[in-house]
Image (cartoon, rainbow, N blue to C red):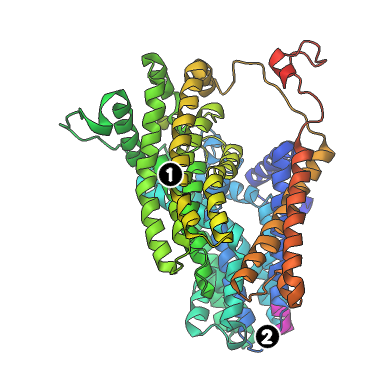
Amino acid sequence: MAGVLSALPAEARILIRMKVAILRHSMTGGKAALMVVGGVLGLGLAAGTIWLSLVRTAHPTVVADLLAAVYLMWMLGWVVGPAWGGSTPLRADHFGLLPVPRRRLAVGLLGAAFVGVTAAVTLLAFLSLLVYAARLGPATVLVAVPAVVLQLVFVVLLSRVAAVAFGVVAKSRTGAAFTGVLVAAMMVLAQSGWMVAVAIQVSGVLTTSFGPGFAGTVRAVPSGWGLVAVESAAQGRWWWALGALAGLALLIVLLLLAWSRSLGTPRRARTTIRGSRGLAAAGRGLFAGRTGTVLRKELRTWWRDPLRTQTVFVPLAWALGTTLLPLTFGEKLLLPWAAPALAVMAGASAVNLYGQDGTALWLTLLTGSERADVRGRQLAYLLVFGPVTVVVAVVCTAWSGLAWAWPWVLALVPALLGGGAGLAALMSVVALAPGPDAHKRPENPLEHGDTTGQANVMFWGGLLPAAPAATVLALGAVYDNAFLSWAGVPVGVATGVLLAWWLGRVASGRLRARGPELLLLMRTGRSSKPVVRIEVPKQAARTALIGWTLGSVALFPQGLVPLVFLLVGVDVKSWFLAMYLPGPYRLPVAAAMVLIGSWLYYVAIRAGLPKKRPVGPEDPSGEDAPRELESV
């Protein structure tokens, strides 16, 4: 390792040591847990890629076609990584005042980019090209070695160029919409990527090959040039092999030059969207009064602010991607649930409305319009997500052809929309995540306040408003009673209206009581009350992590999904354990997996709870703890 570092330029050695020091000191708490989980998942994907290179198939080109497609997926993962994972620890603006030429700085930052879990996991995955080359002959291994190195350098450098491109386009509404779709696509692939494997299995292409169009496309992309070089060497076409490697090297040089040109450049001007002129204020209807004024302001913000644009497109693309993906193997069962899924994810995306506005909160506090502000935001939320959810509900349910789904959709959508409007307003006040003002936002579209915990709570809590209507609908389905089934519709509407009104009232009261504290939190990132630290033992944290991970695997892909498949008569095995068992054992095993997953979730929740009364940092002994903690 020391010999490799000594061969690098001085700037690269310094930046690599800085990156190692940053990673070493950041491996604590939640970041360490996320890094470990990500590393384990990455190792699993890399092992799967290597296993793929060892598979024997009836058609000789199937493995190569699959490898080319998988390499394309790895490249796309590196491209969208900047939008998904945030900025790198070492950014070019950290070194803007140093007298270092941009190209030397680019080389140094590129060297530091290889220090990390993602680069190591990707290198392990690309070693599958060496394994595949060994199957074709010893001479092709000599071509595979530089192909693996060039392929790794290419994807890492492409990721850095993509980060610059995302920073430019994310400041416009079109770029924010594109970024939102990419983020949603990554979420869909992470949770439902197994459906692609099911589609490939059902299609039969593993025995008949993918066809020349697919094979040529995945090899024409630069991620497949390394495979082209190996295949050409195996066929004795050495000029093609050298040409593919030279093309990768040339592309790396061009990307490095383009990236170096973007380093050290002055901050680009932000897009200014000017308002309309000569518009008279509305005097009646929803747009009248103080609430109407807030509503007009919020609707313009939803239309003009790129961050709000991203907030709209993430739930829309996620809901459509999740429910349309089963169409790849001819299944329409999830289509009616597109609208309820959109309503739930909309609330999770809009969980930090006040945090997105920054210190503009002082205008609301100064004018004493807390109630009007909360109501106006709720109305704007419903006007933005309501029409698109209704359109998705009608189109997708009619497309599915499932008549029994209409009462469910018509009952759950208003309950989830109304509950989301109330919960989003309440969570924005009680769990505000401070973010920068609009004119100070960083280039990365995801670095506007960490709302991961709030979004997770909102997603699962956002399902609760559907419980009353779902109970009535379930009773109607059990007793085959049409009246009960359709009675769920007014129950869902009443639940949505009641929750939107009641939770909005609670949110406005909370905003009136804690407004100055929230403003201080927005300005300084610190709360005015003493911080209460809840310590969870490391062993309990590890137990919780294992419980959440294994519980998710047991509950959803091994429990609920095969259970639904068995109930609707879909015979797809894929990686579902229950589907490989004899007929009488399938339902009990799937039900047992649901119970095991639920129990693991219970274990994870219990392990994550503090075992002792939390103590404020000002009094570690706990003798003078605040009285509100004693009541807890």
Residue 54 can be seen, yes or no: yes
Nearer to us in this view, 115 or 433: 433
Residue 75 spot, x, y in % from top left: 56, 62
Image quadrant where residue 366 sits:
top left
Q: CA distance from mark 1 to mark 2?
A: 54 Å
Q: Residue most toward the top?
A: 624
Label 1 vs label 2, nearer the camera: 1
Crowding around mark 1 (Cα neighbors within 10 Å: few <14, some 14 to 19, many 20+) is: many
Describe residue 245's horizontal placement relative to residue 499 as left or right.
right
Q: In the image, what residue occupies the spot 74% across and 41% down?
A: 605
Mark linked to residue 493:
1
Instruction: Give the amino acid type for the residue marked by disc 2 in the picture.
Output: Thr
- Does the magenta-highlighted stretch encompass residue 288? no
Nearer to us in this view, 19 or 276: 276
Q: Residue at x 73, y 51 (%)?
A: 598
| Residue to which mark 2 is pinned | 57
